[in-house]
């Protein structure tokens, strides 16, 4: 196996912004493009950015955002906080504190109070998903579905840029008790030895590919050396392809990273890059195309996923373009999710019935190679629930649903029905159809 070479000089000359520069709440006003915004708009960014995390970089700012369309550009909305991402009373409360000139501690207290009201850990992440071993809570792991364990390496709990919709926003705001992280792989290995049903380990965060290759290798090589017969797949959840493709091209340890990927594959493990692409524009630069090709040359498979979101990608033609381009580049469309019930869900959420229509219309326009995608799906407390569509049964209009994954494996692919509600955006908004008191999984 040979890692794909590419013309470094040509890439650097074509895309000059190859040295990473981060923009956060402290320095975002230093970007030249930000001067296109009014002082009021900049203040709104600061208000929301004191509650929800804000970080972007020069690649996103210079090569992805169309500044002629700001503030309505989808990549701008995807990375820069917007006023309506906070409920009006929360925005007004934080704005008043900032205008008062009070001390940092008071600002932090108000921000934390608001954060606790935003359902920081949905779907039982802290209460139901965290496993134990020999009486010890493994705070850097989650085990919700039988076959898959999520692992949060402590050095990987940040990102090249933060998505404004991210349901893992509590990882980035510095609040005690909200962050998942784990440094030692030994406990992970001990857990896998005890739980032979686990075949997949998903490295997640944050973004594991924010780590230096040496650090990531320490985690993955330890797993490989343990030679666990039940471990078949290593997954890496990442937004690096969308937000910093130079991680695979021009970062100092880019070649070493690709060699690590090769090593995983040569050891007989399936390496799956769970890549987040939220808009077709993220697939258009030469850098991302080169990065995708290099990863694929190692034998890794790139699977793509994204939530469907208002103000970003809630049109079927956007998904059609995105899936077609992903297939053309050799990626595997994997999931269309729904915006989770946390953070700024009210800003991004799409009604379930509308999401189904978006999915259906886009699905009709793509070939079978793109129909690997599943959705729209919500990762709710009992499992991943797919909304199959709107139907009519015995004269009652209903939403048809099923589990793609579930806490109880027997629930998977058992169709069930909810009363049609055109405004429902999450499982908790639905009521059982046909006069039933509860859904079958609630009994």
Image (tube, grey):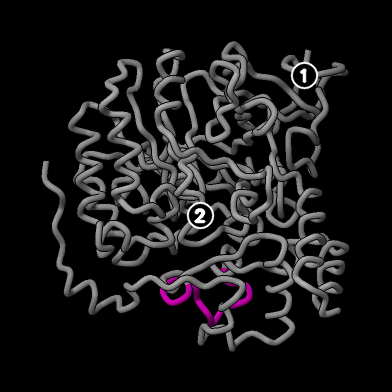
Residue underneath mark 2: 158
Q: Which label belongs to residue 439?
A: 1
Q: Residues within 10 Å of mark 2 (few under 14, many from 20)?
A: some
In screen coordinates, is 395 left or right of 236? right
62 within the magenta span: yes
Which residue is rendered at x = 63% and y = 47% of the image? 167
Count the marks: how many?
2
Question: Is residue 219 highlighted in magenta?
Answer: no
Please tell me which of labels 2 and 1 falls first in the chain: 2
Provide residue 229's location: percent of width, then percent of height.
30, 15
Question: In the structure shown, which secondary structural element does the residue marked by tag 2 occupy?
Answer: loop
Q: Is the magenta region chiefly helix, strand or loop?
A: loop
In the depicted view, which residue is nearer to us: 251 or 217?
217
Q: Which mark is residue 60?
A: none
Quadrant housing the C terminus: top right
Q: Identify which residue, 375 or 48, lies in the foreground.
A: 48
Q: Quadrant of the N terminus?
A: top left
Picture layout, residue 326 above or below residue 76? above
């Amino acid at each position: 196996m040979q890692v794909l070479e590419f013309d470094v000089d040509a890439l650097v000359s074509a895309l000059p912004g190859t040295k990473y520069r981060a923009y956060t709440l402290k320095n975002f006003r230093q970007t030249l493009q930000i001067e296109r915004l009014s002082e009021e708009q900049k203040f709104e960014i600061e208000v929301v950015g004191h509650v929800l995390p804000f970080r972007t970089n020069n690649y996103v700012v210079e090569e992805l955002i169309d500044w002629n369309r700001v503030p309505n550009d989808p990549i701008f909305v995807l990375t820069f906080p917007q006023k309506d991402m906070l409920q009006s009373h929360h925005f007004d409360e934080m704005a008043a504190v900032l205008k008062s000139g009070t001390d940092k501690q008071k600002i932090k207290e108000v921000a934390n109070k608001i954060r606790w009201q935003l359902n920081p850990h949905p779907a039982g992440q802290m209460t139901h998903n965290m496993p134990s071993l020999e009486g010890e809570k493994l705070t850097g792991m989650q085990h919700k579905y039988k076959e898959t364990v999520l692992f949060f390496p402590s050095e990987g709990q940040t990102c090249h840029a933060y998505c404004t919709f991210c349901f893992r926003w509590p990882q980035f705001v510095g609040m005690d008790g909200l962050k998942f992280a784990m440094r030692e792989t030994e406990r992970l290995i001990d857990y896998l030895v005890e739980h032979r049903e686990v075949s997949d380990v998903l490295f997640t965060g944050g973004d594991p590919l924010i780590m230096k290759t040496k650090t990531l290798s320490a985690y993955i090589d330890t797993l490989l050396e343990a030679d666990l017969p039940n471990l078949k797949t290593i997954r890496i959840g990442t937004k690096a392809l969308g937000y910093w493709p130079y991680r695979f091209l021009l970062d100092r340890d880019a070649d070493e990273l690709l060699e690590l990927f090769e090593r995983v594959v040569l050891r007989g493990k399936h390496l799956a890059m769970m890549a987040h692409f939220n808009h077709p524009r993220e697939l258009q630069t030469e850098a991302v195309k080169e990065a995708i090709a290099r990863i694929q040359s190692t034998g890794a498979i790139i699977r793509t996923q994204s939530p469907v979101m208002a103000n970003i990608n809630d049109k079927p033609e956007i998904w059609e373009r995105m899936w077609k381009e992903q297939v053309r580049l050799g990626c595997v469309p994997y999931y269309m999710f729904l915006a989770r019930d946390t953070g700024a869900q009210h800003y991004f959420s799409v009604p379930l019935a509308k999401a189904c229509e978006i999915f259906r219309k886009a699905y009709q326009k793509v070939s079978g190679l793109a129909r690997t995608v599943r959705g729209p799906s919500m990762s709710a407390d009992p499992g991943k629930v797919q909304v199959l569509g709107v139907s009519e049964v015995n004269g009652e209009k209903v939403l048809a649903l099923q589990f793609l994954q579930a806490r109880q494996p027997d629930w998977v692919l058992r169709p069930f029905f909810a009363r049609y509600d055109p405004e429902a955006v999450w499982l908790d908004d639905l009521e059982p159809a046909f006069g039933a008191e509860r859904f079958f999984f609630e009994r």
